Image: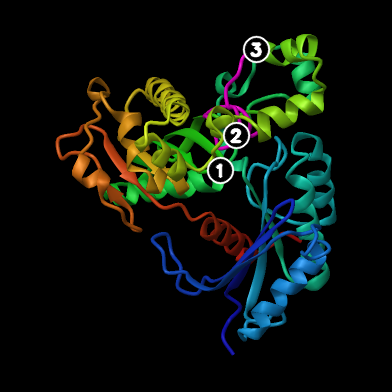
Amino acid sequence: MGAATWVLVLNSGSSSLKYQLIDMAGADADGGAERLASGIVERIGEPGGVADHGEALRRAAGELKEQGLGLDSPRLAAVGHRVVHGGTRFTEPTLITDDVLAGIEDLVPLAPLHNPANITGIKVARELRPDLPQVAVFDTAFHATLPEAAARYAIDTATADRYGIRRYGFHGTSHAYVSRATAKLLGRDPADVNVIVLHLGNGASASAVRGGVCVDTSMGLTPLEGLVMGTRSGDLDPAVVFHLERVAGMSTDDIDRLLNKRSGLLGLCGDNDMREIGRRMAEGDKAAQLAFDVYVHRLRRYVGAFSAVLGRVDAITFTAGVGENSAAVRGAALAGLHNLGVTMDPVRNAVRGHAPRLVSADDSRVAVAVVPTDEELEIARDTYALAAAPQDG
């Protein structure tokens, strides 16, 4: 029987459970991990779906067992959990204890849509394998290095400190993985590379990474701030909320739903799928064109701002669904930025592929890259490193 080198990665959402089983036996900084299985259980708590996360995880365990990869295997070393919000307390991967779990529960007010589902996944996994190390890997952790000038909002400090109001940032596992992979693509040490990472999926965020350390990011207290997203507004004058309360008579919950569920690309043109927006643009649809233009304009603002923050930019990297697959978004976002040292190669940009690649011209001072993200592998690496490390006491 081989050593315990498997890591089960769980991502528990409000109505879904994604899982991957990864063998870390041959893994190193450059790869070597093997994906043994992956899957998703959807419609949790909905008609036609499973009742709760407990049943979802048991179904996932059953699917793994059918493949000869049961959770009772002695090869399973640990379980890694994606947790959205770690606040200021959890700034690195953390071995889960009762005290840590209580701390994550204390952070629910900062992430009421996400942390409760993450907590449920942890509890069920601990029930199924109480003997295994369980590790929480936080979306916010990579951004814990933000300087106070970037993390602080300009509001009364006593109020901010009392209620935990500051910039936390999200998609941290993706930004960490992609910034490091970009340095590898350039053949350089991450400590020597400054990169702007553009994680563009249905949720979207940007980060400024200096020498492997995040120094600024677009998302804030919640994942609502920053770039235009599929259904989220991104940056907004805070007084819009007061205006909607006073003039439209909307409640806090109404405004919350508007900004998180009915805004962004969906709010602008009725579609949140960039592929469909592209099809409509080709047919001359003005609403789709406007949505695209607003989306790209916001991207360019952040590229410019983060270029100023970093001072020297070695690479701009696109990742996630839109970033990896939309040549139109990449081209439009960086068009005309020659003064910032950016020159795209339209032929390279048009080529689709699944491997990390450069899409900039040979004479571009700033490299432009497309790097597929791998958040599950990042979580598995963090989990395995912590689970394998000697524990005090």
Q: Which residue appears at 60% of the width and 39% of the height?
A: 170
Circle nearer the N terminus (1, 3): 3
Q: Residues within 10 Å of mark 1 (few under 14, many from 20)?
A: many
In what element is the residue under mark 1? Answer: helix
Question: What amino acid is found at the position of numbered circle 2 in the picture?
Answer: Gly
Frontmost residue, 112 versus 101: 112
Tell me if residue 45 comes above or below residue 360 in the rendering: below
**Percent coordinates x, y for residue 106 in the rendering:** 83, 40
In what element is the residue under mark 2? Answer: loop
Residue 72 included in the magenta stretch of the image: no
Tag 2–tag 3 contact (CB < 8 Å): no
The number of numbered discs placed on residues in the rendered structure image is 3
Tag 1–tag 2 contact (CB < 8 Å): yes
**Percent coordinates x, y for residue 177 in the rendering:** 47, 50
Say the numbered circle drawn on residue 172: 1
Q: Which residue appears at 62% of the width and 40% of the height?
A: 140
- Residue holding disc 3: 154
**Percent coordinates x, y for residue 368 in the rendering:** 29, 39
- Residue holding disc 2: 169
**Which residues lie in the magenta part?**
222-237
**The C terminus lies in quadrant:** bottom right
Question: What amino acid is found at the position of numbered circle 1 in the picture?
Answer: Gly
SS assignment for the magenta stretch, majority: loop
**The N terminus lies in quadrant:** bottom right
